[in-house]
Amino acid sequence: MLRRRLYLQIYSTIIASLVTVVVLTGLLWNLFGRNQFDHEVVEIVGRLALLSLPAAEAPVGQQREAVQRLGKELDIDITLFDRQRRPIAASGVVSAPPPRSAFRSGRHRMRGGRVWALSLPDGRWLVADFVRRGTHRPLLNLALLLSSVALGVGLVSYPFVRRLTRRLERLQAGVQRIGSGDLAARVEVEGRDEVAGLAQSFNEAAGKIEKLVGAHRLLLANASHELRTPLSRIRLGVELLQHKPDEARTAALRQDVAELDELIDEILLMSRLDARSSTDLSQQVDLVALVAEECARYEQCSLSGTAPDISGDPRLLHRLVRNLLDNAIKHGTPPVTAGITSADDEVFLTVSDSGDGIPEAIHEKVFQPFYRAADKQNVKGYGLGLPLVRQIAEAHGGSVTIMPPEEVGFSIRVTLPAA
């Protein structure tokens, strides 16, 4: 899909602005900035005047008549001077003689550019005064030129810039809504440029934040509920021990304390994994030896297969394997097998049992903290085993999948990247 890059949009805006400047400058120059054209016109007028005027040796009356006729036809004031810059004839207002600084050839500006002194080849001077045709204001014309260019550029670039800034403003409003506590806030993704990518990233980040906060709230609510049961048993046991010491009751209290300690440990581990706290995942781990060590803790549990080493945290990987085996022992049917294979820089750990498995309808629910199926309510545990397995696998860059049911048995596969 073609992406409309932001820098291309800005570049297009600049190009459009420059084109506008060129077009407006051409138009306004044609109207106001015609100095060079005036030079050429004055030069042509001088040549025509030379052709229209009689020779320098002609009678003064003849020269005066020619000058008056030329001034009338051109509608300007014309004064003819001899070689010594003395007036010979004039049409209209008599102009001042050319300054001594004017050279003997070419054309010279006088009185702010509205009066021109033309040096004729025969030594005479012809001074043409254009004031009658209107007042020339170069500063005003320049101000009008620049103002018109700025206005044109502003009109052309405004829709592009406004469209960009409007999307940024909506993104800012979304960030403010998130900051105010509205975790469901999202922004509309418009276009295919960097701003659209930023909006998409914002929506994804907002979704993750909402999911994380929701998971923490659920974890807190469920933890409060689950902690209440062993605490109630401990409180009751302590009260009973105060009236009648009993070794069996003391052992039960120790068991309740151990159970409570295990639950708190799992809750803290889940919170630490959620917060992405610093964990050293760079250690080389022999997964085969690690799984073999955990399998030795259970009866009717076997291991098969080989795989290369992986990088990770041995303590967390021990917990992952232990939770998988515990889940298979508690909720499945022995024997339990752990198979290790590898392919394409990935290592696969598959734990299988001979039980009926998990109904497909609750495949995702079993990875939610404290979830227990309706027929597993009396099984010892808190429903944190598989959620921790998924968190640990994802922390190592892997994933957990419930495999399709076989004819007999049930399997869960963990995929981890090889070292």
Image: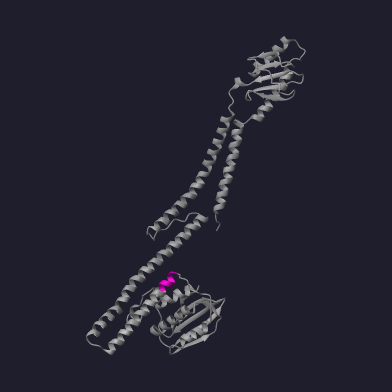
Label count reads 0
> Residue 390: x and y, percent?
44, 75
Q: Is residue 183 magenta?
A: no
Q: Is residue 71 above or below residue 273?
A: above
Q: Is residue 259 above or below residue 113?
A: below
The structure residue drawn at horizontal position 39% and vertical position 66%, both measured from the top left corner, is: 213
- Magenta span main SS: helix
Q: Which quarter of the picture shows residue 307?
A: bottom right
Residue sticking out furthest to the left: 243
> Residue 299: x and y, percent?
43, 90
Tell me how the rendering is colored. one colour
Q: Is residue 123 above or below residue 258?
A: above
The structure residue drawn at horizontal position 48% and vertical position 54%, both measured from the top left corner, is: 190
- On the question of residue 407 being in view, the answer is no
- 172 or 353: nearer the eye? 172
> Residue 261: x and y, percent?
36, 79
Apparent side of residue 26 relative to residue 52 in the rendered image (left or right): left
Q: Quadrant of the C terminus?
A: bottom right
- 72 or 178: nearer the eye? 178
- On the question of residue 32 being in view, the answer is yes
Give the magenta range: 270-275
Q: Quadrant of the N terminus?
A: bottom right
Apparent side of residue 91 relative to residue 384 in the rendered image (left or right): right
Apparent side of residue 8 relative to residue 95 in the rendered image (left or right): left
> Residue 284: x and y, percent?
54, 79
The structure residue drawn at horizontal position 29% and vertical position 87%, both measured from the top left corner, is: 250
